[in-house]
Image (tube, grey):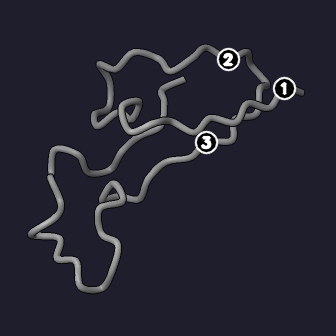
Amino acid sequence: MDVIEYTPTRGQYAYTFGGVASAMRVRPGTVLRLWSEDAFNGVLRSVDDLSSAKVDLRFVNPQTGPF
């Protein structure tokens, strides 16, 4: 069984469903171990960070892939 571990860079995240080129092609049965940022794309780092000041809504919910 093939296992692929994929950790995208910030530029490789997708912020929409559909309309994004595939990150790679995989064969059926391949196991994917994927990583991504949290819903706010890692900009909230402490309890003092205000989402209204730091979060850019164009870049929330980063998606890894598609595959």
Q: Residues within 10 Å of mark 3 (few under 14, many from 20)?
A: few
**Image side of residue 26 versus residue 67, left or right:** right
Tags 2 and 1 touching, CB below 8 Å: yes
**Which residue is at 73% across, 15% downward?**
27
| Residue type beneath disc 3 | Leu
Pinpoint residue 45: horizontal percent, then vertical percent. 35, 72
Mark toward the start of the polypeptide (3 vs 2):
2
Residue wearing tag 2: 26
Residue wearing tag 3: 34
**Element marked by disc 2:** loop
| Residue type beneath disc 2 | Val
Mark toward the start of the polypeptide (2 vs 1):
1
**Which residue is at 18% across, 60% downward?**
55
Q: Residues within 10 Å of mark 1 (few under 14, many from 20)?
A: few
**Image side of residue 51 versus residue 34, left or right:** left
Residue wearing tag 1: 2
**Alpha-carbon distance for marks 2 and 1?**
9 Å
**Image: 57 above or below 30:** below
Pinpoint residue 18: horizontal percent, then vertical percent. 32, 24
